Image: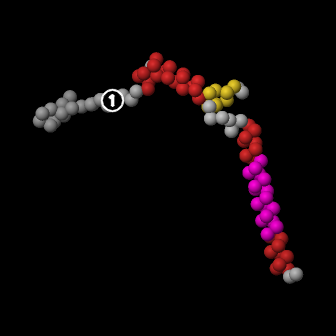
Amino acid sequence: MSSNQLLGRNSRDEVMRLLLAVSMCALLVAVATGLSGCGDTKDTAAKVNGQAIKTTDLDAQLNQLKKQYPQMFTVPTPRVVCSTTSSGFLRD
């Protein structure tokens, strides 16, 4: 074998090792994410101090707030700051 053929094989081996290392790291991150609780069910909105908060609970509290304070959840209508007279000039 010539030195060029050996060099080509070694560089391919290095690329394959690098690819294997990157894929193993990606697999490790995916497993760690799954075990940490980031992959919980869709009904869980958050975890606070280890206690799961459900989206249904949040929706119920939000609906209660909307009933108690409707002005917080409505967009105010724009007010006219100044108007014009029949002649077209601005008035105070």
Q: Secondary structure at mark 1?
A: loop
Residue 4 position (above or below residue 80): below
- At horizontal 52% and vertical 24% (from top left) the residue drawn is 62
Disc 1 target residue? 77
Rendering coords of residue 24 (x, y %)? 78, 53
Q: Is residue 70 left or right of residue 43?
A: left
- At horizontal 82% and vertical 73% (from top left) the residue drawn is 9
Q: Is residue 2 left or right of residue 29?
A: right
Rendering coords of residue 16 (x, y %)? 79, 64
Q: Quadrant of residue 48?
A: top right
**Region of the chain picked out in magenta, as a range:** 12-28
* Front residue (pair 81, 4): 4
Residue 70 position (above or below residue 88): above
Which of the image's four quarters has the N terminus? Answer: bottom right
Name of the residue lying farthest toward the bottom: 2
- Which amino acid type corresponds to the residue marked 1 in the rendered image? Thr
Residue count near mark 1 (Cα–Cα under 10 Å), binned few <14, some 14–19, many ≥20 = few
- At horizontal 74% and vertical 51% (from top left) the residue drawn is 26
Q: Quadrant of residue 43?
A: top right
Q: Is residue 70 magenta?
A: no
